[in-house]
Amino acid sequence: MFETTNSAAQIGIFVSLTMLIAILTYWKVHGKGAERAQDAGSTKEVFLAGGGLTWLFVAGSITLTNLSTEQLVGMNGNQMLLLAWWEISGFVGLLILAYVFVPIYYRNNCTTVTELLERRYKGGSIRTVISALFLLGNILIYLPAALYSGSLFLKSMFGVDWSLIWFAAPMAIIAAIYTITGGLRAVAVMDTYSGIGVLAIAFLVVILALAAVGFDLSTVPAERTSMIGSIDSPIPFHTLFTGMIFIQIFYWSTNQNITQKAMTAPTVKEAQKGVLAAAAVRILIIPAIVVIPGVVAYKLFGSLGDAAYGKLVAHVLPGWMSGAFAAMMMAAVIAHTSAILNSSVALYAVDFHDKFIRPVANHWRLAAIVSVILTITSVLLVPVYENAKSIINLLQQLNGLSSMPILSAFITGLLFRNMDARAAIAGLGWGVALYAFHNFILYVPDTLYAGETFYQHMGIGWLHYIDVMAIVLVTCVLTALTVNRIIFGNRAVFIWSKEGRRLSAIEA
């Protein structure tokens, strides 16, 4: 009788809070006191919330676009403190976004990050190629992975033996409704409201989890509590000084899903305030909530992988509160999915439909059509991720296929003048091929490398995929510069050279 009553309370609170967040979001976006855009169907209103969001909503949207169940489930699923480095280094990435990239995007009046590339290279081909890579990443990786991890969390916490599709489909449908009816404004507002709840309860989970083991993790194996990663760990320590910082620059400063949220403020200063607030949350709160529960779960239950977080939450939170947290997490998954849907629609509308089909007459209608299609594909792809040993490590490795090649295009475009867009594409193609060769032919995660002895004799046995990302980035830039000079006969000019400053003055 107790378990039935407890479950009823848990579900009741879950449903009530989910509805409350929806009502508050609707009131803020569509209510009597809501701000009205002069052109409610404009590109800026649908994809940049009319440029009217305050720093609080910028910070909330950035935080929840990143902090969804991939982080809470995936990082805690590794059950080691080492994974906190992803979040700690993210603080640096956000500072670079605030002080370097935000002024550039606002100065160039960008809706998508790819618009900046087209202006810098004075050609649309690079914009089209990179936009296609972003879209493919969203469709094949970000959307289904978010739904998978969210579904796994809910399944683990509620302790039911349902197919993940039964969790994923409702969340995907609700996310599409937010995107279709409210655009990025609704996404940002929902992100902020649900984000406050997620952070508060997630931090409480940390305290209760540590209390459950008497604040003593001394009996946990040292490799799970050490912050110095060995070569066969997810983050070897030396990689913090090779590829890690470039991964963070790509993710926070050139990734459409994140940077779009930083473009929603009315001014550069307001946007920077929002980004800096998100950076403060990133360094003060996020590292603890994404690793400590997983380590505690290891001490209590042993190795559970991605199921660890959901089981720990069910163990340490009372039933009514676990229902509240489930509601917050579901809202986070929905907001995260809505944000990616909105970014995907923006990329398609601005970079493909407008250019290759016809000018968009009604952005809301196009957003509805594309959102429905992507919702269906993302749900159908959820089962693909069920065999993943670690969702967060898988995502990081898959992201490497495009992240460093894309970042190389930004580096060459922003740091050099007189660059041909086709040279940047050549560098990008080289990077994708090099990374794929290393990770999917040479690299075998459980044994490090196929033909281990041979490759160690070749002097690359110490390489990790994060190291390879740094190598890919450098060689992409060098390839682009070489092709630009030899194939297209252009001499690239460094922007801070005397000639580079002269060209900048002429353009200004």
Image: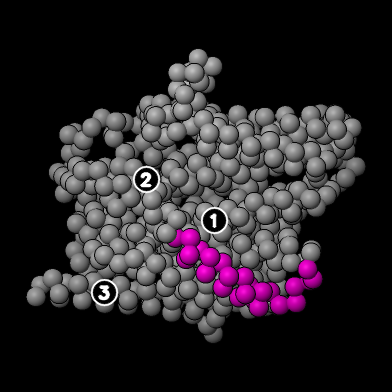
Residue at the spot 23% in from the left edge and 71% down from the top edge: 10
The residue segment tinted magenta is 357-382
Q: Amino acid at mark 1?
A: Leu
389 with respect to 124 (left or right): left
**Mark 1 burial class by Cα count in 10 Å: few <14, some 14-19, many 20+:** some
**Camera sees residue 193:** no
Q: Position of residue 85 (x, y in %)?
A: 42, 37
Q: Mark 3 or 1 closer to N-term?
A: 3
Question: What residue is disc 2 on?
Answer: 389
Question: What residue is disc 3 on?
Answer: 11
**Mark 3 burial class by Cα count in 10 Å: few <14, some 14-19, many 20+:** some
Q: Amino acid at mark 3?
A: Ile
Q: Cβ–Cβ below 8 Å for labels 1 and 2?
A: no
In this picture, is 233 found above or below 159?
A: above
SS category of the residue bearing label 2: loop
Label ID, residue 140: 1
Q: Position of residue 446 (x, y in %)?
A: 38, 33
Q: CA distance from mark 2 to mark 3?
A: 30 Å
Q: Mark 2 or 3 closer to N-term?
A: 3
Q: Cβ–Cβ below 8 Å for labels 3 and 1?
A: no
SS category of the residue bearing label 1: helix
**Camera sees residue 299:** yes
Residue at the spot 19% in from the left edge and 63% down from the top edge: 318
